[in-house]
Image (tube, grey):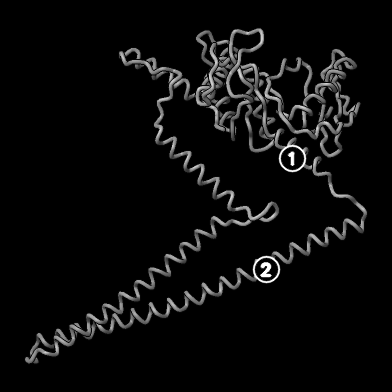
Amino acid sequence: MSKPVTISSLLKRKEGEKEGKEKGYPAKHPNISTSNRFLALAEKGKAARDRTLSAKRFRSDSEYTDIGEDADVCEQEDSVFVNMEKTENQLKEAKTVIDQVKQEVDKIPDPGPLRGVLDGLVKWMALTTSIQENTASVMLDEFAKAKKKAVLVSKVVAEASSQSKAAGQQGKGKQGETDGQPEQDPRKKKFIQAVREAEKSTLVFNMDMGTVAVMNTNTMNRKFSLALKAKAAEVDGNANGEPKTDTVTQLDDTLSMVKSMDYFGKTTKQAKGKDFFTIPVKLAYKDKETRITAEQNLRKLCKVSCTTPYHSTLRDELKKVMEGAKVRYKNSYVQTRLDVDKMEVKVSYRQDGIWYNDVEKFPLPDSVFDLTHKVAKPKQSIPEGMETDGGDSVQG
């Protein structure tokens, strides 16, 4: 899981390679990563620690607690307790040293100015040490009491929370029995979750990612960004093969919204009937609204082929509904909308500039509860004038 390379970075790298070539520097092999491997290992170690801490935060499927933060607080409290106890012992040791010094001063027979100064210093040291010792002792006792009280409160809260949760589950069971309403089918619940997650992502396919197969994710990231740059330059019509500055800015802004980037497969494969290799690329965003806007930008700037990465069984059903609608509403812009709550697909179409919304509704079969994914790129993109969407119906 990674993020795409920005177009600006690719352009800067190209300028650097051009300058190096002019100065006679040897060019780096484009398919060999020269990054610091030890930094990569450090990042993997940090990611593993983050995953471990994240896992510890979940006490159960339905109860969440930030154990990581509590652990930090406990560790700080223990550190403070140890330091204060160490300070108190040091003060007692200092007091013993002062007593020894006082005994030596008392042995001086001459009651002259030096004896007076030494007596004053010893008295001052004894007074200061006594005050610090008393202060540390009081703070240590109060801290111990507070810590003990906090542990007792934590136990009481945990017991109350456990009892409340048990009572809530019993009440929920009784209420369900009284009302006679069955709980939601767990298969449908998982289906809805899968659809909501898929609608945060867009699947881009048929991208020219070179003339040889590659499997390194860093290489695929770079080749995907190069393919986007090439398509953007083609849309802009630039003779030098570079997109316009405004296009680069818009494209980088769109790519910066990608939370993660994954591939449907382990390696690029030769596109059917083409001389380049490709792989479906899944771009995930923070929410559905961001995905819709980003997808519109990619379509406009690069003319890419993309769709929502629903699981295979659902995608097959949507395809059947779309193919039937294309036959019934010829020469019209057709759109299908997925309503997961009602488990149905709704068809709308636009003709002569007028939208006819939800003209047909098709119930989804139970087969869509199979959430498996087939690792295969779509055979062909949806023709112009057709669209499959999981969002709200188009308004005329």
Q: Residue at x 50, y 63 (%)?
A: 74
Query: Label 2 sits on what residue type?
Result: Glu
**Residue 21, horizontal then vertical, whole percent:** 35, 13
Residue 169: percent from left, percent from top: 79, 59
Residue that numbered label 2 is attached to: 159
**Given the image, on which type of amino acid does mark 1 rest?**
Gln
In the image, taking residue 33 as reference, residue 345 lies left or right, namely right
Q: Classify 323 as above or below 260.
A: above
Q: Quadrant of the N terminus?
A: top right
Query: Circle 2 sits in a helix, a strand or a loop, which is it?
Result: helix
**Spatial CA span between label 1 and label 2:** 32 Å
- Callout 2 environment at 10 Å: few (<14), some (14 to 19), or many (20+)? few
Tell which circle, 1 or 2, labels the residue nearer the N-terminal end. Answer: 2
Q: Is residue 330 above or below residue 85?
A: above
Kindly identify which residue carries mark 1: 193
Q: How many marks?
A: 2
Secondary element at tag 1: helix
Residue at the image point whose x is 61% and y is 26% from the top: 263
Q: Residue at x 78, y 62 (%)?
A: 168
Relative horizontal placement of residue 115, taking residue 17 as reference (left or right): left
Answer with the quarter of the image where residue 275 lies. Answer: top right
Mark 1 nearby-residue class (10 Å; few <14, some 14–19, many ≥20): few
Q: Name the front one of labels 1 and 2.
A: 2
> Can you tell which mark lies on residue 214?
none
Where residue 233 sits, quadrant-wise, is: top right
Label 1 with label 2: CB-CB less than 8 Å:
no
**Does 70 sit left or right of 189 as displayed?**
left
Image x and y of residue 147, in percent: 51, 72
Q: Position of residue 351 (x, y in %)?
A: 86, 18
Q: Quadrant of the C terminus?
A: top right
* 335 versus 156 height, above or below: above
